[in-house]
């Protein structure tokens, strides 16, 4: 009975430590990315919105709002800002004229390519102290989690 309590306690501590480590890693990743991308004058939610549009060809405003976990008016506002920067366009859905889809402009695609390079540089910087084997092990462990 006592060994079960100790085992449960150890598992709980390991779980909490893992959560803290993942949280710290995520925070460092976001902060590093923001520093490298600050010259591009974009907020992180704007970058995430662009990424979502890239990955989900011509999503609807509802799709974007759900992804960002915001209301439809908030998503509309976010798209307005990107529209003013000439990064997105609204398209009327050919099958349902009431539905508006969002697409990226060539300018946004070029910008997104730059953002990918920034992200790759941030990852490279964060992993530079790991050996090749450690990097492989990290990828293996992350794949097990997802």
Image: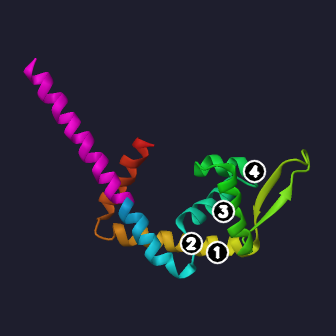
Label pair 2/1, CB-CB below 8 angstroms? yes
User: Mark 1 falls on what kind of element?
Assistant: helix
**Of the two numbered discs 4 and 2 in the rendering, the one whose residue sits closer to the viewer:** 4
Residue at coordinates 25% horizontally, 43% vertically from top-left?
A: 16
Numbered label attached to residue 78: 3
Rate crowding at label 1 as few (under 14), some (14 to 19) or many (20 or more) other CA atoms within 10 Å.
Answer: some
Numbered label attached to residue 60: 4
Along the line of sight, the residue nearer the viewer: 72 or 54: 72
User: Mark 2 falls on what kind of element?
Assistant: helix
Marks 4 and 3, how far apart in space? 13 Å
Along the line of sight, the residue nearer the viewer: 81 or 125: 81
Q: Residue 146: percent from the left, percent from the top? A: 45, 43
> In the rendered image of this protein, does residue 96 appear above or below residue 35?
above
* In-image side of 49 versus 14 (left or right): right
* In-image side of 12 versus 82 (left or right): left
**Of the two numbered discs 1 and 4 in the rendering, the one whose residue sits closer to the viewer:** 4
Q: Would you name the residue on which mark 2 appears?
A: 115
Residue at coordinates 36% horizontally, 56% vertically from top-left?
A: 136
Q: Earlier in the sequence, mark 1 or mark 4?
A: 4
Rate crowding at label 4 as few (under 14), some (14 to 19) or many (20 or more) other CA atoms within 10 Å.
Answer: many
**Of the two numbered discs 3 and 2 in the rendering, the one whose residue sits closer to the viewer:** 3
Magenta stretch: give its range: 1-26
Numbered label attached to residue 111: 1
């Amino acid at each position: 009975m006592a060994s079960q309590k100790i085992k449960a306690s150890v598992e709980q501590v390991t779980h909490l430590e893992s959560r803290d480590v993942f949280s710290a890693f995520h925070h460092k990743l976001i902060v590093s990315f923001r520093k490298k991308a600050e010259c591009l004058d974009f907020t992180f939610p704007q970058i995430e919105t662009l990424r979502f549009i890239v990955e989900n060809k011509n999503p609807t405003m509802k799709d974007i709002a759900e992804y960002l976990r915001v209301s439809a008016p908030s998503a509309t506002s976010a798209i307005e800002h990107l529209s003013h920067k000439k990064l997105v366009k609204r398209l009327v859905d050919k099958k349902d004229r009431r539905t508006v889809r969002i697409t990226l402009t060539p300018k946004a695609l070029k910008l997104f390519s730059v953002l990918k390079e920034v992200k790759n540089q941030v990852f490279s910087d964060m992993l530079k102290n790991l050996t090749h084997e450690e990097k492989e092990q990290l990828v293996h462990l992350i794949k097990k989690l997802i």
